[in-house]
Each structure stands twice: as structure tokens, then as C-alpha cells.
Amino acid sequence: MRLERAWLHAGVYHLAVTIGPRPMGSANERAALQWAARRFAGWGADTAYVMPVPYSERINTSSGVAVGLFRGRSDSLIVIGGHLDSDVRENPGANDNASGTAVMMELARVWRDAERRYTLLFAAFGGEEGNLAGSRWFVDHFPEIERVALMLQIDMAGSDGPLIPFIDSRGHQAPAWLVKDAYAIDRSLGYNSLKYPTQFFTLNAALGGVAGSDHEPFLLRGIPAIDFTAGVGTSPIHTANDRIEFVSKAALERSARLVDGLLRKYQAQGIPAARTGNYMLWQLFGGVLFVPQWAIYAVVGLALLLGVLAFTRGRAQRLQIDKAQRVHFSGAKVFLLLLVIAVFAQLGEAAMQFVKGLRYPWFVHSDEYLTLAALFALAGFWLALWLSRNWRFSPDPYLYLKRGLVPLWLLVILAWLASPRLALYPALTLVCCSLAVYLPGTLLKLLFALAAPVPMFMLMFFELFEFGARSMPRALASYHGFTPSLIYSAALTLLLIIWYLPSFYLLAYTFAHGHRHLAWLRIFRQPLFGLLILLAVFAYGGYLYAFPAYNEQWHANLRVVAQYDQNTQDSRLRLTGDEYFRGVEVKAGDLQQTYDEAIHRAELALPFRADWLSVAGSQTGDARDSTLIQVDWLLTSAKPWNEVRVQVQSDTLALVVMDTNLKYSKRRRADAERFLFRWYADPDDTLRAQASFKLSPGSRLIRQVTAIYAEPPLPLTVTAQYADVTYRTEVTRRDTLVVMPPPTEAGL
């Protein structure tokens, strides 16, 4: 049986369009799980069911895993997985991850009648966007987990961009044989689409594995596993625009054929014995290089040793200059020159923001704006040279060398504490700096000095930089005004200086060491070169001006947030966005207002009532322990809610949860310790919260209930070209509770 594009696309359509957004715990997620299980059963699975996932970390939300088991000659299993949930109510999740689930389902259809050496288990995981809740539960509770010999995951298969193999987990990687086979089959199919972003995964590991998928719990269990993901940075995932219109049928087929090729290989030849690997993968010159962990340790150790030796050599060669002839503040002057360059690197974005009247004019074409930043940095370099033309600098190379080597040496140590892989990049820079000290000849020193910042540059502008850049506007949406912008720019400037200052001092060392041979470089600070750079900046800026900041695929975000306090009946309606309001229209009854100005926050003068939340129940003291409080609360809503939060605290610091069947998180602040109980994604209209708390004698219990609804509190429409609009109404009720005395024996 052959893979069919029509079946692949139909699967995406059913999940993303017919069912729609599928947040963890929602009715739509449950419908998708049941659909997958019915499909497995209809295709003749020996076992087909939905495994309940009653647990989610710190959230009172359940999920599930749809399982289809097709027995083979062996009891050993190969798991083929894809998650079918999406992140929020507005996101149809076409690429992330209706596409991967559709590929997994199509593979189940194709393999249902095939001769099977290994038993195949097809799994549609729920709760992936909820910290891998479905796959974690599956690995911990599937009865035959010890028989799983291999796991293949498809997460995002609908983008024509490179296909990224996710092979890392905490402490180890997928076995090398699995990675080699994936690359070999990808080449044999004529795609050559696998691209492993080494710098991205280095940063990801150092940050605790922010980006990942459902293969990770298997890897952590020591099961060979790999995930294939397409569209990171090139597909509008985690937005309302992750629609089927942007899903490529050819890309769906590519992922399906790759995983199918792996299945055919292992069904025919067997699965190798190695379970995990310990290496750093580099993709070079059309091949893959597996750098063992010990080699990373060796390079970092060698770099630290060379740094010490270079420092010692430079100190031994320092010039003896009479005190009266010494030039002061030479190191500070070099610092100021780099400061000028760092500030100029940001002026390109600032100029385009001013000209186009937008906060993020680069949102669609971030790579092109990096070129603009490079041109402005070059302009800053020229200006720094021109400003310093009459400055005096110390002729002693050691003065600059020590300022470069010492912080770089310390940076390697600090990076090592986060991750040995992360430490490799400043270590390579340290190697170049150290060799520049030892190598003879000014030209060789200059070449290594110029090469020194390259590893750090690669790490900063990692392969999926556009993914990180496009994630930034939403994170910064709540910041507005001059002061936060100034703080952000100052922080970015400081980061650039910390990142590149050691290499910049090495350039100063090289120039001081070979100033006679490098005197010709002074011609670059002539006005002619400045004029040429200025012309290049204007020409490229004019070229970029014609590029749209947003388009049909990439949208800005607008958020309408209504807040209602049931205690005071105060209401507030606010419109916020990550982009300036351009052509934003607001309609509510007789109100019709258009915003077209450089603001991204506005108050809407529309009073409303939203008495949708009711709280009942009791809190009772314990007859045997006066500090023990039993609570039994009923939360009900007049409308379907999207999220419910119950925050409990004492009017003193002391509060302890003694017993509850609910999940909760704990936060300790200066005024009190707070416990948060949270329900998410279509909770029942009536929720019951039961728990026991231990209070300090004489303390009072404070409860705040916040109900969040995915709708406005009154008829209201907000529209703008190339903008996604979400509506939220937050209804809050806060009570200082009276604890009822325990029932007496007479009352009983």
C-alpha cells in the first residue's frame, strides 16, 4: 500500500478545520483522540483505545493518548508518534501538529496490511503543549514500555523548510546509528532536507530544553528516539494563523516517506543494540560529524591551558615604559570604541522603525534586517576609527591582551557551568586568541584575531535566529514607553559588549604588536570610506523599505482584555498589541473608533458588567486542631470558561497545604505564601475544590478566584489588516474568609 498525499492532507483538514483548535484538556482534544482511536480500529489494529492521562503538572486538566497497536512477529515495539493538541483556543494547529499526526495516521494506514517483524504502536499524544504531559504519562504507565526498541516522532511536517532532527535530551543523545540512517534515507529519497542546527540546540540545552517534543521522555528512558520537525521559524506556529492554507502537501509526503523508509529498513534488517549516544552533532560539507563528549572536554581544557600560557607569554613580553610616558585609559578607550559600534548596530532597526512607523518592521524579513544591522555596525566601526584618530593609545600589547584573555577565560568557566557544549564556543575563541599570541608574523596574528569572534558570532546569530526574533514581540508586548525601551536597548548593548569585547581587545593587541606593519589600516578611517558606507546604508535601507513588515502568513497580535471585579463592580477594557496600532478599527454599539498611531496600548471607555462567577461552600475548623482548616468550595459559571484560577493565601506568611486531590503551584512572596489551583481548557461549568490548610493561630484565609473567558463582555469587534485578535474577559472575586467552628458532638 502506498502513501497518498490526499490521505495526508485529509488528516490535517479533519484535525485543523473540522475539529479545530485542540488545547490540552479541551473537548476538541478529546474529539481528536477518539477520532484517532476509531481510525486505528477501522484499519484493523489488534488494540485501539484512548489511554487516559489524568495528570498534568501543576494544572487540573486531563488529556489522553490514542493508541493503535499492530502486532508483528516480535514482541519488541516500534512507537510512531505525533501530538494532536494545539496550544491555545484560537490556534487551529495545522502545522503544529495536525500535520505530524496526519503523517503518523497515514503510516498506520499503509502498514496495517504489511508484513511486520516488529510490533508497531501508533500513538497520537495529547498534552504535548502542556509540558509533554501525554508522552510522559505514556512512558511511565504503558505496560509494555520495556519492550519498546525504537521511537519515531513527527512534530510539524507541513512546511517546505529544512527538516530538523531533534536528537537531544538531558545528558545524552539518540544513538548515532539512528541519526546516520535518517540522513542516509533522506539523501536516498533525493531530499537532502535534514539540517541539524548545532548552535540552536546548544543554546536550547543550556536553557533547559525549551524546545522539544514527545520523543524526549523516551530518550530519557534510554529508548532510541528521534523527532523530525519542519517549519521552526518559517511557519506561523503558536498563532491563529497556523492554518491549513500554509501546509504543504509535498512536505507532508516528505516526512511520511522518511519515517516510512526508516521503518522499512529496521523491519528488514533489525534494530541495532546501542540505546543512546553521547556526542555533539555538526553538519559539515554535506556530511555529519559526531564529536564525542570527551573531545569537547579536551578542547575546553586545552583552551583554558592555552589561555594561561598566552597570558604568561604576553606578560613576559610586556613593554617597560617610564611612568611619565605612559598613556592612561587605553583600555577604557577601546571599550568606548566598541560601545559606539554596539550602539550603531541597533540604529538600523531604530531608523526603519521611525521611517515605517512600526515597532517590528523586520517581522517578515528578519534575515535582511540583520544585513542592515551589519552595515550600521560597519558605519559605527568607521566612526569609532575617525573619532579616535587623534587619541593616544598605549604601545604595550600586553595591556590589551590581559583585558581580553582574563574575561574570556572566566566566560569559558561560566559557560561550562551551564553546559560543556556551550563552553565550546568561547573556548574556540580563546584558542584563536591564544594562538594569535604564539604565532609569528603580524599577518597570522591578524588572521587569528579576525577569526576569534566567529564562534561567538555563530552562537549569537544561531541557525534559527528568526524563530527567536519572532518570539520576542509577544514577550515584550506588555512593555511600553520610553524607559522600558531604553532599558531594553541598554541590555542589548551590554550583551553585545560582553560577547565581543575580549575579541575586540585582541584586535587592539594585534594592532599594538604589529603597528608598523598594520599602519596601512588607518586609510579605512578616511572620509571616503565613511561616504561609501553611508551610501551603502541608504541604498540598502531604501531596498528594505519596500519590504512589508507583515503579510498573509505573518501577523501582528492584538489582544482585547476586559477585567471585572465582582467585589467592587469596577470594570476595565483595554486594547493591547505587540505592534503599533495601524488601521485598527474598534466597533461596539454606537462606538466606532480607528487607531492609526505609534501606540500599542489603549483604554476603551466602555463600562460593562460580567457577574458570571459564583462561589459557594464552606471552610471549617478542625475540632482536634484549631489551626487546621477544611475547605469545600463550589465554583460555578454562567458562561463557558477557558481557565479558572483559585489563589489561596494567609494574612501571615505561614500557610501549608495539608491535603488535597488537586494539583497546585506554590509561590512565596514578601507578604505571604500563595497557593494557586488552576483549571484550563473548557473546565466543567461547576468545579469543586476540596483541601485542608494549616494556618498560624489567629490568621485568616484569603481566597481570590479568577475566571477567564475567551469572549468579550459586550458586543465588540476589533479588526486590523494582518493582525490576529484574541478576546479575554477576566472576572475576579476576592474574599477574606470566616472560618466556621467545627461541629460539636451535641450538634452531631
Image (cartoon, rainbow, N blue to C red):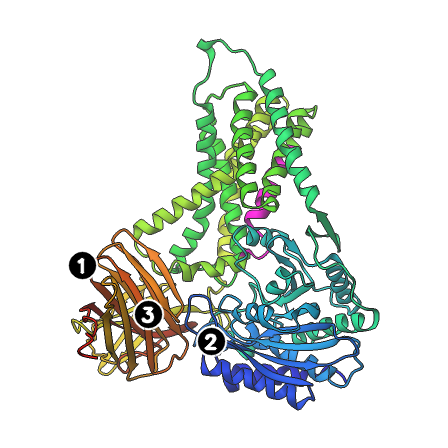
How far is mark 2 from mark 1, CA to CA? 37 Å
Vertical comparison of 295 with 328: above or below: below
Image location (x, y in percent) of residue 696: 23, 57
Q: Amino acid at mark 2?
A: Ser
Disc number for residue 691? 3
Disc number for residue 294? none
Within the image, what quadrant is residue 79 found in? bottom right
- Between marks 2 and 1 in the image, the one whose residue lies nearer the viewer: 1
Mark before the other along the chain sequence, 3 or 2: 2
Residue lying farthest to the right in this orientation = 269
- Between marks 3 and 2 in the image, the one whose residue lies nearer the viewer: 3
Write the residue at 57% across / 57% down.
464
Please give the residue where the numbered disc 2 appears in the rendered image.
Answer: 62
Within the image, what quadrant is residue 647 found in? bottom left
Q: Amino acid at mark 3?
A: Ala
Write the residue at 54% across / 48% down.
460
Label 1: few (<14), some or many (≥20) within 10 Å? few
Label 3: few (<14), some or many (≥20) within 10 Å? some
Image location (x, y in percent) of residue 267: 80, 73
Is 461 colored magenta in this rendering?
Answer: yes
Q: Amino acid at mark 1?
A: Gly
Disc number for residue 698? 1
How far is mark 3 from mark 2, CA to CA? 19 Å
Write the residue at 48% across / 35% down.
338
Provide the major secondary structure of the magenta segment. Answer: helix
Vertical comparison of 442 with 559: above or below: above
First to last magenta residue range: 448-465
